[in-house]
Image: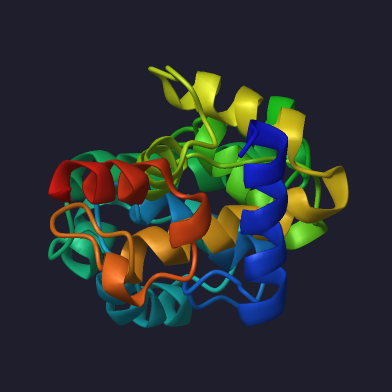
Amino acid sequence: MTRKERFSFVLTYFQEHTPNAETELFYDSPYQLLVAVILSAQCTDKRINMTTPAIFERYPDPQSLSKASFDELFPLIKSISYPNNKTRHLIGMASMLVQKFGGEVPLSVDELVQLPGVGRKTANVITSVVDKQPNMAVDTHVFRVSARIGLTLNARTPLATEKQLISFIPPSLIHIAHHWLILHGRYTCVARNPKCDQCGLRPACKYYANLVKQAK
């Protein structure tokens, strides 16, 4: 199977089996999604969804969040990873939204990465989820799954993975392919003991092919 054929098989499979894949973070606006994604770094979506309702209730918009003090916000997020840094990032992010972007979340990667706590991955999430832009956010799941299947070759960094994926995936599918790969990595192609017996991608998967070869 050529690499092009492998991509075609994987994309067709996901289109048929999970056509409506989307983020598992709860949000009602670009501002809420941005808060949730910043908080989600090295933390589960489940934990973030337990944390954000209290934040959104107390700080429903960037204007109110920008006025929060560290001591006011910290207790609301102390149960998640890196709460000190994330508290500072959220307040700084909201302040910049108000001061530089009129309280609106910008929808370009170049502008988003200017915000405290926002790197390329977060910016790609926001633009692809909110605006369906052809941007591929690479987290640990996307990085692992892409390499295991054989979609990426010798991609040693998230940026290298991103570039290889978007060079083979049609632009119209990139925003949802991000979710396909994340969800596949979260529930099937898990880090330890991947559930190959439950996986429909086995015919195209290099990892599975190696398992079969080793078993012979």
* Residue 139 in the image, given as x and y percentages of width and height: 41, 43
In this rendered view, identify the residue nearer to me: 130 or 216.
216
**Seen in the image, is 38 located left or right of residue 191?**
right
Give the vertical position of 204 relative to 1 (above or below).
below
Please tell me in which quadrant of the rendered image residue 184 appears.
Answer: bottom left
Q: Residue furthest front?
A: 216
Give the vertical position of 46 relative to 71 (above or below).
below
Instruction: Residue 200: tell me if it is visible.
Output: yes
* Residue 52 in the image, given as x and y percentages of width and height: 38, 74
**Seen in the image, is 159 located left or right of residue 139?**
right
Task: Give me the residue at 56% from left, 42% from top.
Answer: 137
Task: Give me the residue at 32% from left, 40% from top.
Answer: 88
Give the vertical position of 50 relative to 102 (above or below).
below
Task: Give me the residue at 63% from left, 68% from top.
Answer: 14
Total tally of numbered discs in the picture: 0
* Residue 104 in the image, given as x and y percentages of width and height: 75, 52
In this rendered view, identify the residue nearer to me: 25 or 39.
25
In this rendered view, identify the residue nearer to me: 67 or 49.
49
Please tell me in which quadrant of the rendered image residue 85 appears.
Answer: top left
**Seen in the image, is 33 located left or right of residue 149?**
right
* Residue 169 in the image, given as x and y percentages of width and height: 75, 42
In this rendered view, identify the residue nearer to me: 55 or 180.
180
